């Protein structure tokens, strides 16, 4: 047995359904199985009687199977097992969806330990898909007041065909094979000793089969440190390589900087001025700049980007007396790219600077030969020719900027808007568009906890825009329960009468198929737009916007909304990033519990675009206390940075979904809550890269780092 051995080779009698399930949850090799950590361990602190249960509890009960039967759900006839579990205090229903075989595994009269979450079904509590372990009887003396004994069992994420029990027994088989003695520890011994971390072998045993709670905690701490340490190694290595490259030196005098700052038609905030000065100092140095500008929604990042662009394109390449250095400005959506193009036209209209736009649906150039005050549509080959010979100093676009055919003459700076929407690989691709490495300014309006920023953007210097433009009012945010809907609609009607406009955000585009039992019963764009027009706001113009529309249709709809031809725009979260309609001051977010706090904050940011009072109505049908607490944080947080910190603290392990958003596992996201751990991992990584950039003295570290970097691309 080796770490890279296929699971099906070591367990040759796997059923096809189990093979399929293992593939679905990403378990292919023995190493995958060893690193499939349980989010939690069941212990007697969580053991309950049936009379003590509340919806949302994660519990363990010892009970007898009083009744059990295989059945089918009403919708789509999904198979399930329904049971009634009984202990000395009462009974609780249990349901296993898509697992009819459970009825044979747990015949009536069986005693077992059940662990799972108490959910709501038809208004009554039940135990959903519980893991179970058969016992000879219901043990006595297991509750805290009766005994100090603890029983620990790992509870793994399951999939149809792979139970928590199967994973636990399979890992025990690996332990018994002696494989753990052959695995090299990727963390250097001196670092383990310095931070009192267990060895790899010990940590694997403790996380999968802990004898006491402190074992499991210590193991999780070690693996959390390991993940952050290797991400930091990767980032610090990239930073060192980046800084060793030549770049264009863009020197501006104090008078020139003042002229740039004074060229805006509005007064910049102190935070904007400080950010611009900091960035201009960076690009005047001997190494390529690599900086992240993090600003809350509406804090004015585009103005900072415009000022930096001004400094770059008014600089001659290599001290020549002609030509301009070039800017590439990449944003995640066509809607945002076109808005940036329009904003830059306003800013550069009197500066005799050409601006290009490139997206999958077409190209544009400003100024037009026939109308110097407007742009014109041009062919892609013509635009690329002008960019390649340096005639277009500023090129704005989507992912189209990364394509092979896009070549610059003197690309001096790359600006990436909404950094979190692009991977590291995409970021590196665009910085390779020039022989001389361009300066890099990444920007994000998604406030990130400091620990997370230090980790995922470890190769970037950080600048914060923590001030809002003068006159901006805070959004009034209200959580709206079903009982308050009608009253809220009347309040909104008063604002619409004043000539304001509104967004309504829905989680889905279409209504779910009623035949599908597991389809989310949440509002859809099409149905909600129709309902609002027929039942709530018949006197107003209502239209829709979603990701499946063609770019031309999206642009036409947004143009109508901007021109006040549409009063209410019902959309998916496609409007989350950068959409700028100052007259839209109201937003309803339907099914708010389906969105993360950061995304809710981004959506709310669509109505902080003017000095008019803005309103955000968070519509939710949830009764779960934890979810309501999370939504209340949206009300109480003073800004996005505070909200990001709250979001991180409110979400428990298994709910962070770091891998989906940042490429970090849930156990790594736990470490992000600990600033000392992040700083320790960062310090150790910096020291190693400083002394041995090629990791010649750390072969095991080097091998592990290769895997990490492939994962993050």
Image (cartoon, grey):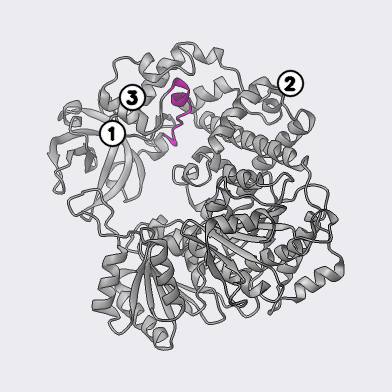
Q: Is residue 172 magenta?
A: no
Residue 46 in the image, given as x and y percentages of width and height: 39, 39
Q: Residue drawn at (58%, 61%), measured in percent from left and top? A: 445
Quadrant the C terminus occupies: top right
Left or right: 201 in relation to 170: right
- Which of the numbered marks, if any, corresponds to residue 237? none
Dot 3 surroundings within 10 Å: few (below 14), some, or many (20 or more)? few
Mark 2 lies on residue: 697
Q: Is residue 415 visible?
A: no
Given residues 516 and 428, the one toward you in this image is 428
What is the C-alpha distance between the residues marked 1 and 2?
A: 45 Å
Badges 3 and 2: C-beta atoms under 8 Å apart?
no
Q: Residue drawn at (73%, 27%), measured in percent from left and top? A: 694
Question: Residue 73 is drawn in which quadrant?
Answer: top left
Q: Is residue 582 visible?
A: yes
Q: Which residues are magenta?
A: 29-41
Asked which secondary structure carries label 2, the reply is loop
What is the C-alpha distance between the residues marked 3 and 1?
A: 12 Å
Q: Choose mark 3 or mark 1, whichever is in front.
A: 1
Left or right: 461 in relation to 710: right
Q: Is residue 544 above or below residue 691?
A: below
Given residues 372 and 217, the one toward you in this image is 372
Question: Residue 356 is drawn in which quadrant?
Answer: bottom right
Given residues 356 and 688, the one toward you in this image is 356
Q: Choose mark 3 or mark 2, whichever is in front.
A: 2
Q: Is residue 546 above or below residue 107?
A: below
Asked which secondary structure carries label 1, the reply is loop
Mark 3 lies on residue: 166
Q: Upstream in the sequence, badge 3 or badge 2?
A: 3
Quadrant the N terminus occupies: top left
């Amino acid at each position: 047995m080796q770490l890279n051995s296929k699971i099906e080779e070591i367990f040759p009698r796997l059923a096809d359904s189990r093979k399929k399930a293992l593939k679905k949850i990403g378990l292919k090799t023995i190493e995958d199985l060893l690193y499939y950590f349980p989010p939690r361990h069941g212990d007697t602190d969580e053991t309950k009687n049936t009379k003590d249960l509340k919806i949302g509890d994660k519990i363990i009960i010892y009970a007898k199977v009083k009744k059990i039967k295989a059945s089918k759900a009403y919708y789509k006839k999904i198979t399930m097992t329904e049971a009634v579990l009984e202990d000395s205090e009462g009974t609780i229903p249990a349901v296993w969806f898509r697992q009819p075989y459970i009825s044979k595994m747990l015949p009536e009269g069986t005693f077992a330990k059940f662990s799972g979450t108490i959910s709501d079904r038809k208004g009554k509590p039940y135990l959903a898909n519980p893991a179970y372990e058969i016992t000879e009887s219901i043990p006595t003396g297991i509750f805290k007041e009766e005994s100090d004994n603890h029983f620990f069992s790992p509870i793994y994420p399951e999939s149809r065909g792979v139970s928590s029990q199967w994973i636990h027994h399979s890992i025990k088989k690996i332990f018994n094979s002696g494989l753990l003695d052959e695995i090299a520890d990727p963390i250097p011994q001196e670092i383990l000793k310095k931070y009192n971390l267990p060895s790899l072998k010990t940590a694997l045993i403790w996380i999968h089969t802990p004898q006491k709670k402190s074992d499991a905690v210590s193991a999780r701490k070690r693996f959390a440190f390991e993940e952050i340490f290797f991400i930091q190694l990767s980032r610090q290595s990239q930073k060192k390589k980046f800084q060793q490259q030549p770049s264009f030196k863009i020197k501006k005098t104090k008078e020139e900087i003042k002229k740039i700052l004074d060229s805006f038609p509005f007064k910049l905030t102190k935070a904007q001025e400080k950010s611009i000065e900091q960035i201009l100092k960076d690009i005047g140095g001997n190494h390529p700049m690599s900086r992240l500008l993090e600003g809350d929604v509406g804090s004015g990042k585009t103005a900072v980007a415009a000022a930096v662009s001004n400094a770059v394109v008014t600089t001659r390449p290599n001290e020549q007396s002609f030509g301009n250095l070039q800017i590439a400005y990449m944003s995640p959506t066509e809607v945002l790219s076109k808005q940036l193009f329009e904003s830059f036209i306003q800013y550069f209209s009197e500066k005799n600077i050409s601006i290009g736009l490139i997206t999958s649906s077409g190209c544009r150039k400003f100024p037009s030969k026939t109308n110097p005050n407007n742009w014109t549509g041009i062919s892609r080959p013509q635009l690329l020719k002008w960019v390649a010979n340096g005639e277009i100093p500023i090129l704005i676009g989507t992912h189209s900027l990364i394509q092979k055919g896009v070549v610059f003459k003197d690309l001096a700076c790359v600006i990436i808007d909404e950094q979190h929407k692009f991977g590291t690989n995409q970021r590196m691709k665009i910085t390779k568009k020039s022989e001389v490495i361009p300066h890099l300014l990444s920007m994000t309006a998604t406030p990130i906890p400091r620990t997370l920023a230090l980790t995922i953007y470890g190769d970037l210097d950080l600048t914060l825009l923590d001030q809002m433009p003068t006159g901006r009012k805070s959004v009034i945010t209200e959580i709206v329960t079903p009982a308050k809907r009608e009253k809220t609609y009347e309040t909104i009607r008063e604002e619409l009468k004043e000539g304001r406009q509104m967004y309504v955000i829905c989680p889905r585009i279409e209504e779910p198929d009623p035949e599908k039992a597991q389809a989310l019963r949440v509002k859809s764009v099409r149905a909600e737009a129709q309902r609002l027009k027929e039942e709530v706001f018949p006197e107003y113009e209502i239209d829709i916007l979603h990701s499946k529309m063609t770019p031309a249709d999206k642009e036409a709809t947004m143009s109508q909304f901007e021109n006040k031809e549409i009063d209410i725009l019902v959309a998916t979260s496609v409007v989350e990033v950068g959409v700028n309609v100052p007259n839209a001051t109201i937003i309803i977010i339907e099914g708010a519990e389906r969105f993360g706090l950061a995304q809710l904050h981004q959506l709310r940011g669509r109505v902080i675009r003017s000095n008019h009072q803005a309103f955000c109505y968070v519509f939710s049908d949830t009764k779960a206390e934890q979810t309501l607490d999370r939504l209340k944080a949206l009300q109480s947080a003073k800004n996005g940075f505070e909200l990001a910190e709250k979001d991180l603290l409110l979400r428990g392990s298994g709910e962070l979904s770091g891998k989906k958003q940042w490429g970090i596992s849930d156990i790594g996201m736990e470490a992000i809550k600990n600033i000392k751990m992040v700083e320790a991992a960062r310090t150790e990584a910096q020291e190693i890269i400083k002394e041995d950039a090629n990791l010649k003295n750390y072969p095991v570290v080097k091998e592990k780092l290769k895997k990490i970097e492939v994962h993050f691309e």
